[in-house]
């Protein structure tokens, strides 16, 4: 699995929004959340190209960036890695921790119930 830093992930999120995207498009999207320096973003883009997380094509005088990682598959792998590292592969302690600190909304609970019901239906 490709290791992506927090800053690289934010850049990748901006690319996932709409691609291919120029560096200026990406910088504009990032700057909607917080200020980013152009040089920093371009350094991160180059780093992510070398890692194989994104690719680029040259169009006239600019580069257009596209993701090589799909958002859903990347977040699933990262989630599984987090659960394995922090909870020995068990999901229940993670959910219980959120429930104990009252960070689960009724919507979260309803969605979890639906996921469990669907899983039970498919695995009976």
Image (cartoon, grey):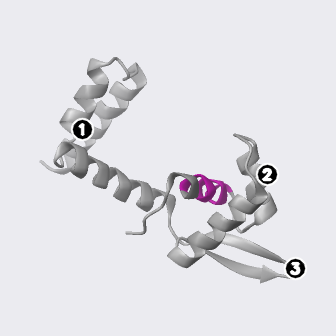
Compared to 18, does 85 lie above or below?
Answer: above
Residue range (magenta): 9-17
Q: Which residue is mark 3?
A: 61
Q: Quadrant of residue 65?
A: bottom right
For the residues labelled 3 and 2, the Cα–Cα distance comes to 18 Å
Number of residues whose C-alpha sits closer than 10 Å to that of mark 1, classed few (under 14), some (14–19) or many (20 or more): few
Instruction: Please tell me which residue is depicted at 34% across the width and 17% down the height of the picture.
Output: 102
For the residues labelled 2 and 1, the Cα–Cα distance comes to 40 Å
Q: Secondary structure at mark 3?
A: loop
Residue 57, how many percent across, how many down? 72, 81
Compared to 79, does 39 lie above or below?
Answer: below
Which sits earlier in the primary sequence, circle 2 or circle 1?
2
Which sits earlier in the primary sequence, circle 3 or circle 2?
2
Instruction: Please tell me which residue is depicted at 38% across the width and 28% down the height of the picture.
Output: 108
Residue 104, how many percent across, how many down? 36, 23
Q: Which residue is mark 1?
A: 116
Check whether the beta carbons of the residues at disc 1 and disc 3 lie within 8 A of each other. no
Q: Quadrant of residue 113?
A: top left
Towards the viewer: 8 or 90: 8
Q: Quadrant of the N terminus?
A: bottom left
Q: Residue furthest left?
A: 124
Q: Secondary structure at mark 2?
A: helix
Q: Based on the picture, tell me whether residue 10 belongs to the magenta stretch.
A: yes
Looking at the rendered structure, the number of numbered marks drawn on it comes to 3
Residue 116, how many percent across, how many down? 24, 38
Instruction: Please tell me which residue is depicted at 66% across the width and 54% down the height of the picture.
Output: 14
Q: Secondary structure at mark 1?
A: helix
Q: Which residue is mark 2?
A: 28
Q: Nearer the viewer, mark 2 or mark 1?
A: 2
């Amino acid at each position: 699995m490709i290791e992506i830093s927090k800053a690289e992930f934010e850049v990748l999120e901006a690319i996932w929004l709409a691609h291919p995207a120029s560096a200026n498009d990406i910088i504009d999207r990032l700057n909607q959340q917080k200020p980013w320096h152009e040089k920093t973003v371009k350094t991160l883009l180059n780093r992510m190209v070398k890692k194989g997380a994104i690719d680029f094509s040259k169009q006239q005088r600019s580069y257009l960036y596209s993701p090589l990682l799909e958002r859903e598959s990347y977040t699933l792998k990262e989630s599984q890695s987090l659960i394995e590292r922090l909870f020995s592969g068990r999901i229940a302690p993670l959910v219980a921790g959120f429930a104990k600190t009252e960070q689960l909304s009724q919507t979260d609970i309803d969605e979890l119930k639906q996921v469990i019901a669907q899983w039970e239906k498919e695995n009976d």
